[in-house]
Amino acid sequence: MKHNISTFYISLNEINGEGRDKQEQIKYYVKESIENYGIDYVLLIGNEEKMPVRYSYDSNFSGSPEPFISDLYYSDIYDAEGHFCSWDSNENNKFAETKQDKESHSTVLLDEVDLYPDVHLGRIPCNNTNELDIIINKIIEYENTIKKPWFNNMVLFGGNNFPWMVDHLVNFLLKKIYPGYNSHIAWEGEELCDTVGNIMNDFSLKKFYASATMFPYFNKIRNVEKPTAEGINEAINDGAGFVLFSAHGNPDLVLTYMPFFKRIPIPFPLGYSRYEVQSLQNGKKLPIVVLGSCSGGDFSTLTGVPSPLGFEFLKLEHGGSIASFCYTSKVWISPGLSHIDTKGGFLEYNLFKAYNEGIRHPGEMLTKSITNYLNDDIALWEAHGDLYIHYGDMQMLSLFGDPTLQIP
């Protein structure tokens, strides 16, 4: 029993029922557990070699599938009619497969997927039992500690994810010419951070914005600081309930850019990397980290690294995070003011919106974010046959950590 949540453990060796492979056997076991025991949460333990992963064949930037890990496969159990959702309705062993019809500018769904999570799911992609023990001890300590004042701090990092966008320049010039111009410049990462900060009413915000590097005169007025790796770590070490990185990235680091300048990475000179995470000394002041960047959760043996940035945060023994939300591949985002309306920006914002609405388990925050996306016609708007983009972003977003974690 964990905080009034009945819990049981099952090993892979005990799962040998229906299914074409171990992944499908696991999914059928989750289905049986929903129907026989009424389970609401699932926690997968292990990296790709220890806990099998399912690769999605959703189209990528070039229009052809580039497989990526999707743990949503294990939580999307039923289709809209209540039947088992295999993610491979054409039975070719390529799951959640899509392609683009260039003539009609539409997405062709080669497999029927539902995508609505039927259980709240997370994974601890540990490589060994030592890492698992560290994380379990962190979770126990976190949940047994009375809420501390540091929890109500929040660290926000963002910048201009699409330098040289014409709408930025036009808005900037119009503002100068017409002070009453009814619009504002939207540098994507900063826009998301500001919007998230506006709904986290009980939190003190520590903002690290790339624009602070260009416009230092306004920093005090805007209450922002220049992003440096040292400054970000100092803020995390002081204690924070949440940390949001809205930026570019890969499995090893996150970075952003100053407005209009793509050649200079921020934090200068190499971004914020695993080495900065490994040097954190925040002890028991453990935040939930949201990595709004490409591949921060890519632990694939094909394209990723054994310990991507999201897991570096989680596994750090004397600090880091208590849970990490991150993407297992190259997440799509929209530029300018549309950043929060769809794609990755929408998903990240809705994680915090779920918390603001009273949800206090990270697994439910993830479920709520994906469900909100599927129920929002604007977010799912298929402008140029890009439904595969929406589907891909939802399939990539993952929780590293315990889905039942009790958040203050």
Image (tube, rainbow, N blue to C red):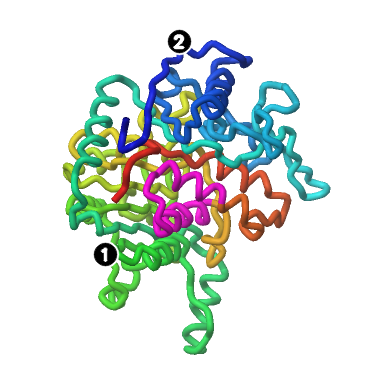
**Quarter of the rendering containing residue 126:** top left
Identify the magenta region: 344-371
User: In the image, what residue type sits under mark 1?
Assistant: Ser
Instruction: Say if the magenta span includes residue 349.
Output: yes
Instruction: Say if the magenta span includes residue 233.
Output: no
Q: Position of residue 169 (x, y in %)?
A: 52, 73
Q: Identify the residue position indicated by label 1 in the image.
A: 204
Q: Position of residue 268 (x, y in %)?
A: 31, 54
Residue 157 against residue 282 in the figure, above or below: below
Packing grade of label 2 (10 A; few <14, some 14-19, many >=20) is few
Q: Where is residue 308 in the image (x, y as percent from the top left)?
A: 38, 34
Type of secondary structure dominating the magenta stretch: helix
User: In the image, what residue type sits under mark 2?
Assistant: Asn
Q: Identify the residue position indicated by label 2 in the image.
A: 13
Along the line of sight, the residue nearer the viewer: 169 or 382: 382
Q: State left or right for residue 79 relative to residue 364.
A: right
At horizontal 47% and vertical 62% (from top left) the residue drawn is 188
Asked if residue 270 can be seen in this view, the reply is no
**Quarter of the rendering containing residue 61:** top right
User: How far is mark 1 from mark 2, CA to CA?
Assistant: 47 Å
